Image (tube, coloured by chain):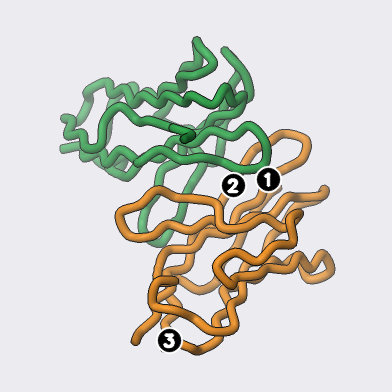
């Protein structure tokens, strides 16, 4: 059973905090993605990584950074959380044509 | 630039009615097109992909390169089809995967 696991289901952080969202996959996939999911806006790509230490900006990278030190782990970092980053964050990994998703992390910034 | 457009935010039908969820895309090369579905309280998952030309849960989608469309169809909707549907596009060159804004399908009894 393939697995993409996000470290937290729910997070509440204060404005200005540094926030780490972790994602781990056990499928040996090369490609990993971070999206945010907002009503009416769909899934918007923040960053993706096509190999260890390799990354590419998506459509909305501002205010975010990522880290991929190991193939199985892809971290999303909010350097200084702001209220407009309150959202559902989805991680995905993709080896062939199909992407597999994590359960999501609902982040609230207060 | 890659772009996926789903014009309908919400589509409501009665059980047994035909369903068509629209998807248009823009991409300069040869894209891979997908439909993903998210049922209530479940993870987003792949429904079907254009290269397979398959029918999953009675749904089909045909890639029309002339109209740059990949509409999802089902002749007779069921209540269990109620979910959020996302059209997605990937590049053969970069594996970048982008999604549309999604359409919520509600099937009433």
Check contact, mark 1 vs mark 2: CB within 8 A.
yes
- Secondary element under disc 1, as helix, strand or loop, is strand
Which residue appears farthest toward the top when viewing the image? A69
- Residue with the mark numbered 2: B98
Residue at mark 1 shares a chain with residue at mark 3: yes
How packed is label 3: few (under 14 Cα within 10 Å), some, or many (20 or more)? Answer: some
Left of A82 or right of it: where is B58? right
In the image, the chain rendered in orange is: B
**Mark closer to the observer (1, 3):** 3
Q: Position of residue A65 (x, y in %)?
A: 44, 23
Quarter of the figure with residue B26: bottom right
Going from N to C along the chain, the mark reached first, 3 or 2, is 3
Residue B29 versus residue B95: which sits nearer the camera?
B95
Q: Please name the residue shown 43% across and 73% down the image.
A: B105
* C-alpha gap between disc 3 and disc 2: 31 Å
Q: Is residue A62 left or right of residue A20?
A: right
- Write down which chain is painted green: A
Question: Residue at left 15%, top 38%?
Answer: A110
Give the mark nearer the N terminus: 1 vs 3. 3
Which residue corresponds to mark 3? B15
Residue A75: % across, % down: 41, 22
* Residue highlighted by disc 1: B90
């Amino acid at each position: 059973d393939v697995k993409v696991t996000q470290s937290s289901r729910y997070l509440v952080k204060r404005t200005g905090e540094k926030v780490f969202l972790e994602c781990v996959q056990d499928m040996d996939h090369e490609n990993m993605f971070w999206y945010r999911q907002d009503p009416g806006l769909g899934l918007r790509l923040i960053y993706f990584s096509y190999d260890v230490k390799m990354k590419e900006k998506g459509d909305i990278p501002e205010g975010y950074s990522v880290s991929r030190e190991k193939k199985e782990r892809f971290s999303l970092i909010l350097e200084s959380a702001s209220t407009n980053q309150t959202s559902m964050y989805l991680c995905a990994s993709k080896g062939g044509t199909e992407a597999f998703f994590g359960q999501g992390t609902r982040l609230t910034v207060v | 630039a890659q772009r996926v457009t789903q014009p309908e935010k919400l589509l409501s039908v009665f059980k047994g009615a035909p369903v068509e969820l629209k998807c248009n895309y823009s991409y300069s090369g040869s894209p891979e097109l997908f439909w993903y579905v998210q049922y209530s309280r479940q993870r987003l998952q792949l429904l079907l992909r254009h290269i397979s030309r398959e029918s999953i849960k009675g749904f089909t989608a045909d890639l029309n390169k002339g109209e740059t469309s990949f509409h999802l169809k089902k002749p007779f909707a069921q209540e269990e089809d109620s979910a959020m549907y996302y059209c997605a596009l990937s590049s053969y060159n970069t594996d970048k995967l982008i999604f549309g804004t999604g359409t919520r399908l509600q099937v009433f009894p």
